[in-house]
Amino acid sequence: MRVGIGYDSHPFGPKGKSRKLVLGGVQIPHDRALKGHSDADAVAHAVTDALLGAAGLGDIGRMFPSDDPQWKDADSIHLLNQAFLKVVEAGFQFVHADVTIIAERPSLAPHIGAMEARVAEAVLAGSTHVSIKAKTNEGMGWIGRGEGIAVLAVATLAEHGD
């Protein structure tokens, strides 16, 4: 068994921008979106890093560099799927991912099931193999002030044949 840890955070962009807030491949109704080179899906980014770390394959920035224009506004669930396929090619099988989203707003509880399903689909697993939780930062720090969102993820892999 191999375990990897992923982390990602993004600040919110200005209000009224046309970009949508996307977490775990799901559009979340909110008046602001996260800033980033791709679609800024912090859930997909953290899970991608956790998978790549568990497999010893580096990180999302090496695989999909933010200075490469081909990844501008990219669908991060697609990037997660592409990273997952590299993990499988390296001889690993996905077992489980556990994700914690840290955000004051918006309320994410109504969207957790859809996010779990989208992330699980990207790693070719059933939704019971992905657990997503949302927590606030109790008003503390940049997250507590509503300036952005952070995500922690842990992924477990098994070597093929185990």
Image (cartoon, grey):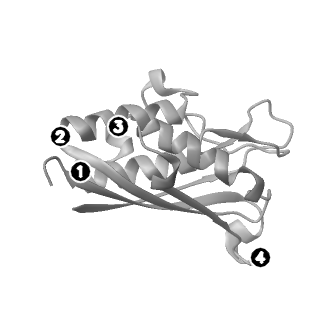
Question: Which residue is denoted by mark 2 in the rendering?
Answer: 90
How far apart marks 2 and 4 lie (CA) works out to 42 Å
Which is closer to the viewer, label 3 or label 4? Answer: 3
- State which tag comes first along the sequence, 2 or 4: 2
- Is label 4 in a helix, a strand or a loop? loop
- Percent position of residue 93, x then y: 26, 46
Task: Pick the residue in front: 55 or 148.
Answer: 55
- State which tag comes first along the sequence, 3 or 4: 3
- Percent position of residue 75, x then y: 55, 30
Question: Which amino acid type corresponds to the residue marked 2 in the rendered image?
Answer: Ala
Q: Quadrant of the N terminus?
A: bottom left
Question: Which residue is denoted by mark 3 in the rendering?
Answer: 83
Residue 14 quadrant: top right
How far apart marks 1 and 4 lie (CA) works out to 36 Å
Question: Which residue is denoted by mark 1 in the rendering?
Answer: 55
Would you say the residues marked 2 and 1 are in contact, meaning their CB atoms lie under 8 Å apart? yes
